Amino acid sequence: MPAKCYGILLRYRYDSYYFIPIYKLTIPPLFSGVNIISIQIFNKCQKKPDGKLLSRHSITDLEFSDPTDLEQMGELGIIAEIYPQIQSIAERSSKLAMIEEKIGKERGRYYWNRRKMADSKVILSCATDLPLLIDNIPESIYHACGGWFPEGGEAYNKENTLTVPELLKAWTKGGAYNLYCEDTLGTLEAGKKADIAVLNENIFETALEDIRHIQVCLTFVDGIPVYQAL
C-alpha cells in the first residue's frame, strides 16, 4: 500500500544549494514508508562536514518505524519527536489486534521502538498531542520505560523501552534542543532559566510498576515558585 505524506513542502534557493524545509509533517504511525520518504527529502538538505544536517529537522509520531530508518536518522542528526504517554490511552487487546491486522506480529516487534532510536544516537524530544494535553513524567516512565498498558500485566515489546535517565533527557535536554532553546532551558546550569519541577518521590528508586502515583509537589518558573503542594 503506498504511503501518503501529509505536509507542506517548500523549495527555496539557498546560495548554490536547494534547501527543502518541511514546516509540518504528520506521519501516520502505520506507514514506515513515510519515514523513508521524509529521510530521503532531508538527505537532500545541506550538511555539515560530519554528515549531519546543517539545520535541525524532526519527524514526529514515530510509533512504528523500520530499524534501518532509525539508523539513518541518527547519521543525519534528525530529531525524533516521541509521545511517551501515548500507551496510556491504549487498551491492550484492541491495540494488539490493530497491530496484528495492519502490520502483522513480525513487524509489530518494531512498534514503539525507542530503544533502537537511542542506540542509533537519534536525538529524542518528548511531547504530548491530542488528547494528551498535560505532560505527566511518572506516567510516561511507566509506559515508555516499563512497557505496560494502563491495565498492567505483561510488558509489550519490553526490549524497545528506554531507561529512566534516557527518557528524562528526552523530556528536558532533547526538548530544549528541538526548540532551539538549549542555551536557556533543558539542563540545570548557571545562567539558564530556573524552570524546575520537584516530585514527591525519587523516580530513580521507585519501582517502575509503582511510579504512576508520584506527583509534582513544587514548580519553579524563572526561579519563582508558581505551584506548591507540600
Image (cartoon, helix red, strand yellow):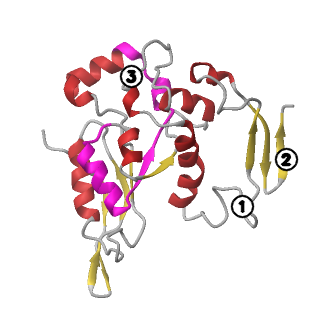
Query: Label 1 sits on what residue type?
Result: Glu
Q: Position of residue 199 (x, y in %)?
A: 74, 34
| Residue lying at 82% horizontally and 55% vertically, measured from the top left | 223
Q: Is residue 136 visible?
A: no
Q: Position of residue 1 (x, y in %)?
A: 12, 38
Find the residue positioned furthest to the left.
Answer: 1
- Which residue is labeled 2 in the image? 225
Residue toward you, 203 or 128? 203
Few, some or many C-alpha atoms within 10 Å of disc 2 (few <14, some 14-19, many ≥20)? few
Query: Label 3 sits on what residue type?
Result: Tyr
Few, some or many C-alpha atoms within 10 Å of disc 3 (few <14, some 14-19, many ≥20)? some
Q: Which mark is residue 2?
A: none
Q: Earlier in the sequence, mark 2 or mark 3?
A: 3
Quarter location, residue 94? top left
Residue toward you, 191 or 216? 191
Find out whether residue 110 is within the magenta segment.
no
Q: Position of residue 136 (x, y in %)?
A: 62, 34
- Which residue is labeled 3 in the image? 156
Q: Earlier in the sequence, mark 3 or mark 1?
A: 3
- Which residue is labeled 1 in the image? 189
| Residue lying at 58% horizontally and 57% vertically, measured from the top left | 176
Q: Secondary structure at mark 3?
A: loop
Q: What is the spatial separation of the Cα atoms under label 2 and label 1, in whole angstroms?
A: 18 Å
Q: What is the spatial separation of the Cα atoms under label 3 and label 1, in whole angstroms?
A: 37 Å
Q: Position of residue 105 (x, y in %)?
A: 22, 23
Q: What is the spatial separation of the Cα atoms under label 2 and label 3, in whole angstroms?
A: 38 Å
Instruction: Tell me which segment is drawn in magenta.
Output: 64-93
